[in-house]
Amino acid sequence: MAKVIMTADDSASIRQMVAFTLKQSGYEVVQAVDGQDALQQLASRKVDMLITDLNMPNLDGIGLIKGARALPACKFIPIVMLTTESQDSKKQEGRAAGATGWIVKPFKPEQLLAVVKKVLG
């Protein structure tokens, strides 16, 4: 059974690139257009991992992580931030909210896969 990974990003091209990369490696991918969309989907479906952007309309990545961590099914899943932000203060804010890892855009597909394999075991 394939592991299910949700990707939340307001950029369609980033979502497509992440989905393409993950699907090629045998993962099932669920896409969300922003944090609010992701939280609504997470309320009714189980995912094994969440990859989220930081800066999104309606609900940003930090808000999404906090909301996801409040859901029993998402309490312990790996959550990775995929964002252009690389400041330590942002990373600390992400970790404090419950992020497991951090990837800075632009990213290489093999870099993304290495992080996914590491956190999903």
Image (cartoon, rainbow, N blue to C red):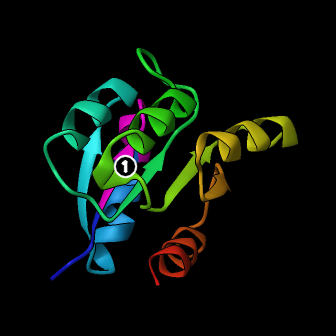
Farthest-out residue, top? 58
Residue 16 visible somewhere in the drawing: no
In the image, taking residue 111 as reference, residue 18 lies left or right, namely left
Give x and y (percent) for residue 50: 41, 53
Q: Which quarter of the image is occupied by the N terminus?
A: bottom left
Q: Which residue is mark 1?
A: 7
Over which residues does the magenta segment extend?
5-14
Residue 21 versus residue 64 in the image, above or below? below
Give x and y (percent) for residue 113: 50, 75
Residue at the spot 37% in from the left edge and 28% down from the top edge: 34
Amino acid type assigned to the residue bearing label 1 in the image: Thr
- Label 1: element kind: strand
Residue at the spot 55% in from the left edge and 80% down from the top edge: 118
Give x and y (percent) for residue 65: 49, 39
In the image, taking residue 118 as reference, residue 43 lies left or right, namely left
Closer to us: 57 or 14? 57
Residue at the spot 57% in from the left edge and 48% down from the top edge: 82
- Quadrant of residue 55 in the image? top right
In the image, taking residue 5 as reference, residue 107 lies left or right, namely right
What crowding class fits label 1: few (fewer than 14 Cα within 10 Å), some (14-19), or many (20 or more)? Answer: many
**Residue 8 located within the stretch drawn in magenta:** yes
Residue 88 visible somewhere in the drawing: yes
